[in-house]
Amino acid sequence: MSTRTIGVVVGSTRKESINRKLARALIRLAPGSLRCEIVRIDDLPVFNQDREKDAIEAAVRLRRQVAEADGILFVTPEHNRSIPTALKNALDWVSRPYGENKWAGKPAGIAGTSPGAVGTAVAQQHLRGMLGYLDMPTLGQPEVFLQFKDGLIDDDGEISEESTRKFLKGFMDRYAAWVEEHAG
Ligand code: FNR
């Protein structure tokens, strides 16, 4: 089995992001067949169709990283019962210009965490709809709706609770199999 490169897109841009902690935990739990790397989205300007063909460094870089990846793992917070602006912005930049959608065909996984009881479930449903339109085959199960509690995951992605660690490990194993099935 060859090594697969996974671009990890974290939907939060804040320094102490609990979703970045979750992303680091998932990267640590990934099987050896995956090489996962967080890709930046915080330096993108607000999408403007007038500028979609311009050589904007952050957009050019992100499109290249997505094009070169074998799969994309989204780890996102929920903002006002949908996905955060920064994530929508990244989806838009990489989907354009028309006919050059770089997300197409990339096997996707979705995870997210929130202090709230629904654990980003509503945002993830919205994201699934968008990824369908963007032509990304997206893993259906397990769904990772993780309610975050203080100390659950540290800055290095170390998980304090064994049941959560096992669940997230299972998710990464399923995602790796999904990538193997759907990557070109
Ligand atoms: C939130 N938060 C939130 N939480 C949730 O479960 N459902 C929601 O709809 C919202 N809405 C929302 C809107 C906005 C603008 C903010 C800033 C926050 C709370 C959110 O889950 C919390 O801030 C998390 O810490 C965000 O994840 P990161 O940024 O720490 O990864």
Image (cartoon, grey):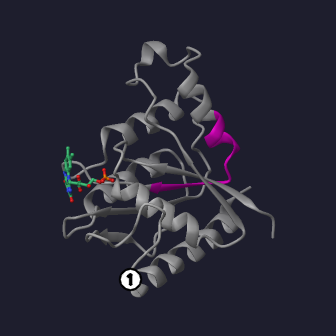
Q: Residue at x 74, y 55 (%)?
A: 184
Q: Secondary structure at mark 1?
A: loop
Please tell me whether residue 55 belongs to the stretch shown in magenta. no
In this picture, is 6 found above or below 145?
A: above
Please tell me whether residue 66 belongs to the stretch shown in magenta. yes
Q: Residue at x 54, y 27 (%)?
A: 59
Specify the quadrant of the image occupied by residue 90.
Answer: top left
In this picture, is 169 found above or below 90?
A: below
Which kind of residue does numbered mark 1 sit on? Glu
Specify the quadrant of the image occupied by residue 182.
Answer: bottom right
Would you say 108 lies left or right of 15 here? right
Find the residue positioned furthest to the right.
1
In this picture, is 100 found above or below 84?
A: above
Q: Nearer the viewer, residue 25 or 53?
A: 25
Q: Residue at x 31, y 38 (%)?
A: 85
Residue 53 location, x and y as percent? 56, 16
Residue 125 location, x and y as percent? 32, 59
| Ligand 1 contact, mark 1 (Cβ < 8 Å) | no
Q: Mark 1 sits on what residue?
A: 161
Would you say 105 lies left or right of 121 here? right
Q: Residue at x 40, y 72 (%)?
A: 143
Find the residue positioned furthest to the bottom.
163
> Dot 1, crowdedness within 10 Å: few (<14), some or many (≥20)?
few
**Total numbered labels:** 1
Tell me, yes or no, if residue 103 can be seen here.
Answer: yes
Tell me, yes or no, if residue 97 can be seen here.
Answer: no
The magenta segment is 64-74
Residue 91 location, x and y as percent? 45, 39
Instruction: Please state, as top left, top right, bottom left or bottom right, where the N terminus lies in the image.
Output: bottom right
Q: Nearer the viewer, residue 150 or 47?
A: 150
